Amino acid sequence: MNKERLNIANKLLEFIHKSPTKYHVIDNIKSALLEQGYIPLSFNEKWELTLHGNYFIEQDNAALIAFRMGENMFEKGIRLICAHTDSPTFKVKPIAEMKDADNYVRLNTQGYAQPILTTWFDKPLSIAGRVALKGESPFTPNIRLVDLASPLLLIPNRAFHLTQGKTEQDISKQKEMLPILTIADEETNVEGILKRMIGKKLQITSDDILEYELYLYPYEKGQLVGMNADFIICPRQDDLTMVYAAHHALMETNAKNNAINMVAFFDAEEETNSALGGADTPFFRNVLTKIVKSMNGDEDDMIKMLHNSFTVSLDVSFATHPNYRECGDPTCSPVINKGITIKYDANMHYATTALSSAVFQDLCKQAGIPFQKETSHSDFRTGRTISAFLQTQTEMRCVEVGIPCWAMHSSQESCGTKDFYNLIRFLVAFWNHPT
């Protein structure tokens, strides 16, 4: 196995392990950008940008846009790579603790983004997210990230003999997917136990916590699997493999182009796309407006810049499954480690067109990067990504790209080590190609 390929795969596993929620994803990327000299921006300030300057701005702790300024951005546009930070999971409800007659303490949760429920049974789980603390003003609470970072919970399955043929569709999220935290004593005050745990972790009092947004996550770290470390198996590959690939490529790209090199990591793709920091909000366009104005441009310059721009939207794709070949398309079903994928959809859930696909294919051929073409089986619905939603805010040519993945929305997903490496190679080539 190629050592560089293994090294990058292990870096991905470490990144995902340290990023249990979308908030931690953005915090980790932000720290890396600051180390590389990127300058943080704010919507509250006038932007005074310089050619070839490196900048970033975050939104609501869950979305971020980073970019390197180009010399002729109005004529050459933006080379944008985008992905999303959210993943299927379970969110802890605002009043969570539930103690039953046998003193089992469970947490009340709500499923987020259609996780495969059976894959969450019988695994050590932990809790992470963000908390809002009292600030100087009611309108400016202090935000702290928290990761309890220990195997605190489990969702136990029933014995096989008691299942009575129950399937995934028969499982009640409200009844059967509630994680067990502990068995309490009769005297234990269950109310507020979660806030007390958070307070201890952050070294604050629970009374300082005004609100929280907390999520469950599989505690165990992912691994490389296969006789030749062929596969990467870990949680949240949808879409953190794509986020890390874009981030890694940005750090590896030093080209000073005429275009702006940009990454955009959006929130809420798995559901609405319209929450703060989502692709279907003004967040992205507001950033572009501030960039254009900093270069003394106007609306005509904005339109020209968008017209000359190109987007690579990243999300994992459905891999051919050797045990379920009937679920794949007869001619357009990609195989793991055979190449990165162009994603197509007749109903335009993906923004790929003949023009944008041609751009992608030519870049791959010039860089010697293998690629495949993917569409869904016509009897199944395809996934949806940020690309189509982004078009409602800013019309840009766009190709939908991914790598083949097994078990999408499972608590543990699988992709190919070679595909991940080749995806990063393509993203670097995309940015480094002369304008």
Image: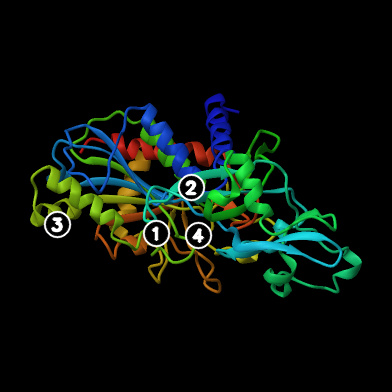
Quote the CA–CA distance across marks 4 and 3.
35 Å
**Quadrant in which the N terminus appears:** top right
Residue at 20%, 40% (x, y): give it.
259
Label 4 or label 3, whichever comes before in sequence order: 3
Left or right, 119 with respect to 36, comes to right
Three-letter code, disc 1: Ile
Q: Depth-wise, is mark 1 or mark 2 nearer the camera?
A: 2
Three-letter code, disc 4: Cys
Residue 329 appears anywhere in the view: yes
Label 1 or label 2, whichever comes before in sequence order: 2
**Quadrant in which the C terminus appears:** top left
Residue 368 appears anywhere in the view: no
Q: Nearer the viewer, residue 335 or 244?
A: 244
Label for residue 332?
4
Q: Are marks 2 and 4 in contact (CB under 8 Å)?
A: no
Provide the residue designation for mark 2. Answer: 23
Label for residue 303?
3
Residue furthest to the right: 161
Label 3 or label 1, whichever comes before in sequence order: 3
